[in-house]
Amino acid sequence: MDDDTALIQTVDFFPPIVDDPYSFGQIAVANALSDVYAMGGKPLTALNIVGFPVALPKEILGSILVGGSDKAQEAGVLIVGGHTVDDEEPKYGLSVTGIVRPGDEVTNAGAQPGDNLVLTKPIGTGVITTAAKQGVAPEDVLKTAVGIMSQLNLAASHAMNEVGAHACVDVTGFGLLGHLRGMTRASGVGASLSFDSIPFIPGASELAESGVAPGGTHRNLDSLEADVAWDDSITDVQKILLADAQTSGGLLISVSEDSTAALLSSLEEHGVQTRAVIGSITDEADAPSIHISKN
């Protein structure tokens, strides 16, 4: 817009992944705002995007919108309107407008060899919400996952901006490895991950061991075949978890080795509970560019 202000525009919406309408609204808004936070930007306004069956009680829609409104208010975002259509399946999300100072934006294309990779939320929401749809997710496991998905990436974004991250993505539908691949391709680099360093939501591994995983997770894993070199000790279930399709996941931040300690400290000061160094950026850009070891 001028020398000091650039716009960030993003949109995201999806069907319910949990039964509680209010929680669904909260998760959908946290998820929609996440791309702005991943760019180091500040979301300002949003428009509701709603698909809703005419036959369902309107109180359900009201609860969804209240959940979304409360989460937007927490983020300091004003929902200024929106649009609703009759749909066979409920859907909700936002079109978001944010701002960032030109030159200060963080993209997925700036990762540099020697950087550390820091993750700010644990993995496993795809497996857990799929288990919930099948009626096999323990109540405490689902409750933890809902809390994680409802968390804004606002604090993590502030911490990232304070130390000057080189690159960032938010971990959502393409899974941890899919979004990391996007970063490595855009940056012309490779990456090395330690499985034992990656945080998972308690209960996710056990559900994956029982055979639970969304279809999107399997498609993610299939798409990674040429890009990932797996250590022989990595099991099929562990591969599923690394490709698990996330909703409202954390930020995956590429930061210089010299700034890593400052980032971890800033994340802690901002109240970000998960702050795990899970790997590093390498100069191995040729496929397979991502190498996974056990530890």
Image (cartoon, rainbow, N blue to C red):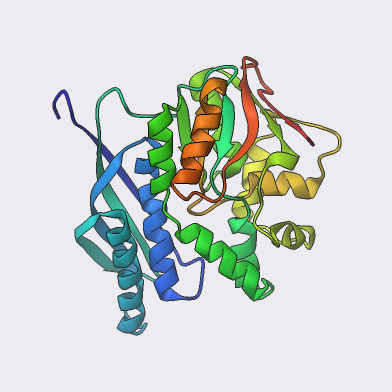
Rendered location of residue 79, percent (x, y): 22, 59
- Left or right: residue 42 versus residue 35 is left
Q: How many numbered discs? A: 0
Rendered location of residue 205, percent (x, y): 74, 56
- Left or right: residue 204 versus residue 235 is left
Relative to the observer, which residue lies in front, 227 or 268? Answer: 268
Image quadrant where residue 15 sits? bottom left
Rendered location of residue 139, percent (x, y): 63, 75
Name the outermost residue toward the right. 232
Residue drawn 59% across the image and 51% down it: 216
> Looking at the figure, which quarter contains the N terminus?
top left
- Left or right: residue 27 versus residue 141 is left
Tell me: residue 114, above or below residue 84. above
Image quadrant where residue 190 sits? top right
Rendered location of residue 291, percent (x, y): 72, 27
Residue drawn 46% across the image and 38% down it: 266
Residue drawn 75% across the image and 46% down it: 238
Q: Is residue 62 visible?
A: yes
Tell me: residue 257, above or below residue 59. above
Residue drawn 81% across the image and 32% down it: 231
